[in-house]
Amino acid sequence: MSSVAARNNYVEATNDKKKSRTGAVDRSAVTCYFCDKTGHFKSECPEKAQWEAAKVAKAAGAHSARLAAKTDKAFTIFEDAVTGAW
């Protein structure tokens, strides 16, 4: 077998493997690992997207509350120092 024919056989075999890996997936047989419903992957889960958005909003709210508490405390200390109530 010539080297050109051997290379062509190798390329065909490699392309066949790629086709089998990238073929269309039957979504009806797929189960989400987040919500346990069929028809989508975890990375595409609408419930996971809502959960992540709520988690981010909650974290931002907690951060804002901590910042507000620190600001109030600093303002109170400053106000006491200025008025001599310290």
Image (cartoon, grey):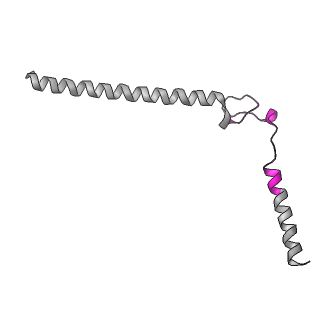
Name the residue at 9% across, 21% down: 83
As drawn, the residue found furthest toward the left would be 84
Q: Quadrant of the N terminus?
A: bottom right
Name the residue at 84% across, 71% down: 7
Q: Is 15 above or below relative to 61?
A: below
Name the residue at 77% across, 35% down: 30
Name the residue at 22% across, 28% down: 74
Magenta stretch, main secondary structure, is loop
Residue 60 lies, in percent from the top left, at 43, 29
Residue 66 lies, in percent from the top left, at 34, 28
Residue 20 lies, in percent from the top left, at 83, 51
Q: Is residue 86 visible?
A: no
Residue 49 lies, in percent from the top left, at 60, 30
Q: From the viewer's perspective, is 76 left or right of 51?
A: left
Q: From the viewer's perspective, is 60 left or right of 11?
A: left
Q: From the viewer's perspective, is 60 left or right of 22?
A: left
* Residues in magenta, as a range: 17-42
As drawn, the residue found furthest toward the bottom would be 2
Q: Is 22 above or below relative to 37?
A: below
Magenta region includes residue 39: yes
* Tally of marks: 0
Classify residue 67 by image quadrant.
top left
Magenta region includes residue 78: no
* Closer to the camera in the image, 57 or 29: 57
Q: Is residue 32 visible?
A: yes
Q: Is 21 above or below relative to 86?
A: below
Q: Quadrant of the C terminus?
A: top left
